[in-house]
Amino acid sequence: MRGRLRSIWRLFDFALSTFFGIVGFFLRIVMGKPKEVAGLRFRRRWLQKVPRRLGLQMTMEGEPYSGPCLYVANHISYIDPIGILMYVDAKIVAKAEIANWPLVGYSASITGTIFVKREHKDSRSSAAQAVREALMRNESILVFPEGTTSEGPLTLPFRPRTFEAAEAADIPVQPVALFYEDPSVAYIGDDQFLSHFISLSQKKSVQGHIAFGPLLTGEDTCERAKAWIDQYQSRFISNPVVHEPA
Protein backbone atom coordinates (compact mmCIF):
# COMPACT_ATOMS: atom_id res chain seq x y z
CA MET A 1 0.00 0.00 0.00
CA ARG A 2 2.80 2.41 0.90
CA GLY A 3 4.45 1.77 -2.46
CA ARG A 4 1.20 2.51 -4.32
CA LEU A 5 0.65 5.77 -2.45
CA ARG A 6 4.25 6.74 -3.13
CA SER A 7 3.78 5.98 -6.81
CA ILE A 8 0.56 8.02 -7.06
CA TRP A 9 2.17 11.02 -5.37
CA ARG A 10 5.29 10.84 -7.53
CA LEU A 11 3.32 10.50 -10.76
CA PHE A 12 1.19 13.48 -9.77
CA ASP A 13 4.23 15.54 -8.80
CA PHE A 14 6.09 14.56 -11.97
CA ALA A 15 3.15 15.48 -14.20
CA LEU A 16 2.43 18.74 -12.37
CA SER A 17 6.07 19.87 -12.28
CA THR A 18 6.52 19.06 -15.95
CA PHE A 19 3.25 20.74 -16.97
CA PHE A 20 4.05 23.97 -15.13
CA GLY A 21 7.57 23.85 -16.50
CA ILE A 22 6.13 23.77 -20.02
CA VAL A 23 3.78 26.64 -19.14
CA GLY A 24 6.78 28.61 -17.86
CA PHE A 25 8.61 27.87 -21.12
CA PHE A 26 5.79 29.39 -23.18
CA LEU A 27 5.51 32.41 -20.89
CA ARG A 28 9.20 33.14 -21.43
CA ILE A 29 8.69 32.83 -25.18
CA VAL A 30 5.79 35.32 -24.99
CA MET A 31 8.04 37.66 -22.99
CA GLY A 32 10.55 37.64 -25.81
CA LYS A 33 13.09 35.07 -24.58
CA PRO A 34 14.74 32.98 -27.33
CA LYS A 35 13.46 29.41 -27.48
CA GLU A 36 16.94 28.07 -26.69
CA VAL A 37 17.21 30.18 -23.52
CA ALA A 38 13.67 29.31 -22.38
CA GLY A 39 14.30 25.60 -22.95
CA LEU A 40 17.55 25.68 -20.99
CA ARG A 41 15.84 27.44 -18.07
CA PHE A 42 13.05 24.85 -18.06
CA ARG A 43 15.54 21.97 -18.05
CA ARG A 44 17.67 23.41 -15.24
CA ARG A 45 14.72 24.22 -12.99
CA TRP A 46 13.14 20.81 -13.60
CA LEU A 47 16.38 19.00 -12.80
CA GLN A 48 16.80 20.91 -9.55
CA LYS A 49 13.65 19.36 -8.09
CA VAL A 50 12.07 16.41 -9.87
CA PRO A 51 14.82 13.71 -9.90
CA ARG A 52 15.20 13.71 -6.11
CA ARG A 53 11.44 13.76 -5.62
CA LEU A 54 11.34 10.62 -7.76
CA GLY A 55 13.81 9.03 -5.35
CA LEU A 56 16.82 9.12 -7.68
CA GLN A 57 19.99 9.24 -5.62
CA MET A 58 23.29 9.27 -7.50
CA THR A 59 26.78 8.81 -6.09
CA MET A 60 29.28 10.67 -8.27
CA GLU A 61 32.93 9.93 -9.01
CA GLY A 62 35.28 11.96 -11.14
CA GLU A 63 34.80 15.48 -12.43
CA PRO A 64 32.37 16.43 -15.20
CA TYR A 65 34.01 18.65 -17.81
CA SER A 66 32.56 22.15 -17.76
CA GLY A 67 33.48 23.17 -21.32
CA PRO A 68 31.98 22.10 -24.68
CA CYS A 69 32.08 18.32 -24.72
CA LEU A 70 30.66 15.13 -26.18
CA TYR A 71 29.50 13.08 -23.19
CA VAL A 72 29.10 9.38 -24.04
CA ALA A 73 27.49 6.93 -21.63
CA ASN A 74 26.30 3.36 -21.34
CA HIS A 75 22.53 3.05 -21.56
CA ILE A 76 20.40 1.17 -19.02
CA SER A 77 17.13 3.06 -18.63
CA TYR A 78 15.19 6.18 -19.63
CA ILE A 79 16.30 7.76 -16.35
CA ASP A 80 19.94 7.76 -17.52
CA PRO A 81 19.76 11.25 -19.09
CA ILE A 82 18.18 12.61 -15.91
CA GLY A 83 20.99 11.22 -13.78
CA ILE A 84 23.67 12.69 -16.05
CA LEU A 85 22.01 16.07 -16.65
CA MET A 86 21.91 16.64 -12.91
CA TYR A 87 25.63 17.34 -13.31
CA VAL A 88 26.12 18.73 -16.83
CA ASP A 89 24.37 20.96 -19.37
CA ALA A 90 24.00 19.18 -22.70
CA LYS A 91 21.58 18.42 -25.48
CA ILE A 92 20.56 14.76 -25.72
CA VAL A 93 20.47 12.42 -28.68
CA ALA A 94 17.46 10.14 -28.13
CA LYS A 95 15.38 7.61 -30.03
CA ALA A 96 12.44 9.10 -31.91
CA GLU A 97 9.84 7.03 -30.00
CA ILE A 98 10.42 9.18 -26.92
CA ALA A 99 8.86 12.14 -28.74
CA ASN A 100 5.49 10.35 -28.41
CA TRP A 101 5.68 9.72 -24.66
CA PRO A 102 3.20 11.79 -22.61
CA LEU A 103 4.76 15.03 -21.30
CA VAL A 104 8.24 13.49 -21.50
CA GLY A 105 8.38 13.72 -25.28
CA TYR A 106 7.31 17.33 -25.51
CA SER A 107 9.60 18.33 -22.64
CA ALA A 108 12.49 16.69 -24.44
CA SER A 109 11.71 18.47 -27.70
CA ILE A 110 11.60 21.98 -26.21
CA THR A 111 14.95 21.46 -24.48
CA GLY A 112 16.72 20.77 -27.76
CA THR A 113 16.76 16.96 -27.86
CA ILE A 114 17.98 15.55 -31.17
CA PHE A 115 15.64 12.69 -32.09
CA VAL A 116 16.81 9.85 -34.30
CA LYS A 117 15.11 6.83 -35.87
CA ARG A 118 18.04 4.47 -35.60
CA GLU A 119 16.54 1.98 -38.07
CA HIS A 120 16.42 4.66 -40.80
CA LYS A 121 19.64 5.65 -42.53
CA ASP A 122 18.38 9.14 -43.45
CA SER A 123 17.38 9.85 -39.85
CA ARG A 124 20.76 8.67 -38.57
CA SER A 125 22.52 10.93 -41.08
CA SER A 126 20.38 13.93 -40.12
CA ALA A 127 21.02 13.34 -36.42
CA ALA A 128 24.76 13.02 -37.02
CA GLN A 129 24.71 16.31 -38.93
CA ALA A 130 22.75 18.01 -36.13
CA VAL A 131 25.29 16.75 -33.59
CA ARG A 132 28.17 17.98 -35.71
CA GLU A 133 26.60 21.45 -36.09
CA ALA A 134 25.87 21.70 -32.35
CA LEU A 135 29.46 20.76 -31.48
CA MET A 136 30.73 23.29 -34.00
CA ARG A 137 28.72 25.90 -32.08
CA ASN A 138 30.54 24.78 -28.92
CA GLU A 139 27.39 23.18 -27.47
CA SER A 140 27.73 20.02 -25.41
CA ILE A 141 25.99 16.82 -26.49
CA LEU A 142 25.03 13.72 -24.50
CA VAL A 143 24.77 10.52 -26.52
CA PHE A 144 24.32 6.83 -25.75
CA PRO A 145 26.44 5.21 -28.49
CA GLU A 146 25.13 1.68 -27.90
CA GLY A 147 21.94 2.85 -29.63
CA THR A 148 19.70 0.93 -27.21
CA THR A 149 19.40 0.00 -23.55
CA SER A 150 20.92 -3.13 -22.04
CA GLU A 151 21.15 -4.76 -18.62
CA GLY A 152 24.95 -4.60 -18.72
CA PRO A 153 27.20 -4.75 -16.92
CA LEU A 154 29.42 -4.51 -20.02
CA THR A 155 28.44 -2.35 -22.97
CA LEU A 156 27.17 -3.28 -26.41
CA PRO A 157 29.24 -2.17 -29.44
CA PHE A 158 29.49 1.62 -29.77
CA ARG A 159 28.42 3.43 -32.94
CA PRO A 160 31.23 5.75 -34.10
CA ARG A 161 29.44 8.60 -35.89
CA THR A 162 29.20 11.06 -33.01
CA PHE A 163 32.83 10.43 -32.09
CA GLU A 164 33.79 11.39 -35.64
CA ALA A 165 31.70 14.56 -35.28
CA ALA A 166 33.54 15.46 -32.08
CA GLU A 167 36.91 14.98 -33.77
CA ALA A 168 35.84 17.17 -36.71
CA ALA A 169 34.71 19.91 -34.31
CA ASP A 170 37.88 19.57 -32.19
CA ILE A 171 35.71 18.87 -29.13
CA PRO A 172 36.85 16.43 -26.40
CA VAL A 173 34.96 13.26 -25.49
CA GLN A 174 34.21 12.39 -21.87
CA PRO A 175 33.04 8.84 -21.08
CA VAL A 176 30.33 8.56 -18.42
CA ALA A 177 29.65 5.25 -16.67
CA LEU A 178 26.30 4.46 -15.04
CA PHE A 179 25.31 1.66 -12.70
CA TYR A 180 22.12 1.09 -10.67
CA GLU A 181 22.07 -1.11 -7.62
CA ASP A 182 18.61 -2.49 -8.47
CA PRO A 183 18.66 -4.42 -11.78
CA SER A 184 14.92 -3.84 -12.28
CA VAL A 185 15.73 -0.22 -13.18
CA ALA A 186 16.81 -1.51 -16.61
CA TYR A 187 14.30 -0.68 -19.36
CA ILE A 188 14.72 -3.40 -21.96
CA GLY A 189 12.95 -5.86 -24.21
CA ASP A 190 9.16 -5.62 -24.16
CA ASP A 191 8.96 -3.16 -21.27
CA GLN A 192 6.23 -0.52 -21.63
CA PHE A 193 7.12 2.96 -20.47
CA LEU A 194 4.08 3.73 -18.30
CA SER A 195 3.95 0.38 -16.49
CA HIS A 196 7.72 0.42 -15.95
CA PHE A 197 7.62 4.01 -14.69
CA ILE A 198 4.82 3.18 -12.23
CA SER A 199 6.80 0.20 -10.93
CA LEU A 200 9.93 2.32 -10.61
CA SER A 201 8.12 5.13 -8.80
CA GLN A 202 6.91 2.71 -6.12
CA LYS A 203 10.45 2.14 -4.89
CA LYS A 204 11.55 4.14 -1.88
CA SER A 205 14.68 5.18 -3.74
CA VAL A 206 16.77 4.32 -6.78
CA GLN A 207 20.44 4.17 -5.87
CA GLY A 208 22.76 4.86 -8.77
CA HIS A 209 26.44 5.42 -9.43
CA ILE A 210 27.83 7.82 -12.02
CA ALA A 211 31.48 8.22 -12.93
CA PHE A 212 33.01 10.84 -15.22
CA GLY A 213 36.11 9.61 -16.98
CA PRO A 214 39.16 11.29 -18.53
CA LEU A 215 38.87 13.66 -21.48
CA LEU A 216 39.65 11.87 -24.73
CA THR A 217 40.79 13.30 -28.07
CA GLY A 218 42.06 11.75 -31.29
CA GLU A 219 40.95 9.12 -33.75
CA ASP A 220 40.31 6.23 -31.37
CA THR A 221 38.03 7.93 -28.83
CA CYS A 222 35.21 5.47 -29.56
CA GLU A 223 37.30 2.45 -28.54
CA ARG A 224 38.90 4.18 -25.55
CA ALA A 225 35.57 5.49 -24.22
CA LYS A 226 34.02 2.02 -24.41
CA ALA A 227 37.04 0.45 -22.73
CA TRP A 228 36.94 2.98 -19.87
CA ILE A 229 33.21 2.46 -19.24
CA ASP A 230 33.60 -1.33 -19.36
CA GLN A 231 36.50 -1.12 -16.92
CA TYR A 232 34.36 0.89 -14.51
CA GLN A 233 31.47 -1.58 -14.85
CA SER A 234 33.76 -4.54 -14.21
CA ARG A 235 34.05 -3.38 -10.60
CA PHE A 236 30.42 -4.36 -10.09
CA ILE A 237 30.95 -7.78 -11.68
CA SER A 238 33.60 -8.75 -9.15
CA ASN A 239 31.91 -6.88 -6.28
CA PRO A 240 28.16 -6.98 -6.88
CA VAL A 241 26.03 -4.54 -4.90
CA VAL A 242 23.37 -6.10 -2.71
CA HIS A 243 20.31 -3.83 -2.59
CA GLU A 244 17.45 -3.79 -0.13
CA PRO A 245 13.98 -4.62 -1.51
CA ALA A 246 11.66 -1.64 -2.09
Image: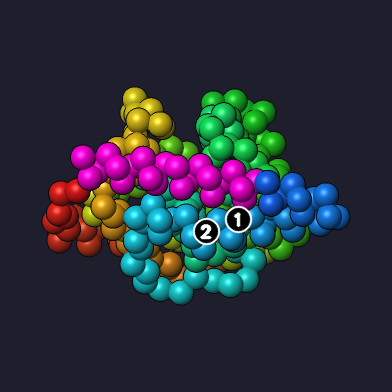
Could you say where residue 20 lies in the image, as x and y percent from the top left?
Answer: 61, 48
Total residue callouts:
2
Residue 171, given in percent of the width and then of the height, sits at 64, 64
Relative to 122, 33 lies left or right: right
Residue positioned 50% across, 66% down in the render? 87
Q: Is residue 69 visible?
A: yes
Quadrant assignment, res 66: bottom right
In the picture, the quarter occupied by the N terminus is top left
Frontmost residue, 86 versus 174: 86
Q: Is residue 226 left or right of residue 22?
A: left
Name the residue type under label 2. Leu
Image-based side of 174 in relation to 122, left or right: left
Q: Work out whether 51 lies above or below 5.
A: below
The three-letter code of the residue at mark 1 reads Arg
The one of 101 and 168 positioned closer to us in this rendering: 101
According to the picture, the residue beneath numbered tag 2 turns out to be: 47
Which label was assigned to residue 43?
A: 1
Disc 2/disc 1 C-alpha distance (Å):
6 Å
Other-residue count near label 2 (Cα within 10 Å), few / some / many at <14 / 14–19 / ≥20: some
The one nearer the camera, 63 or 172, is 63
Q: Position of residue 30 (x, y in %)?
A: 83, 49
- Residue 128 seen in this snapshot: no
**Is the residue under label 1 in contact with that under label 2 (CB below 8 Å)?**
yes
SS for tag 2?
helix
Please state the extent of the stretch shown in magenta in the rendering: 1-22
> Is 230 situated left or right of 66 in this image?
left
Disc 1 secondary structure class: helix
Q: Residue at x 59, y 61 (%)?
A: 44
Image spot of residue 167 (x, y percent): 63, 58
Among the 4 quarters of the image, the one containing residue 5? top left
Which secondary structure type mostly characterizes the magenta part of the structure? Answer: helix
- Mark number, residue 141: none
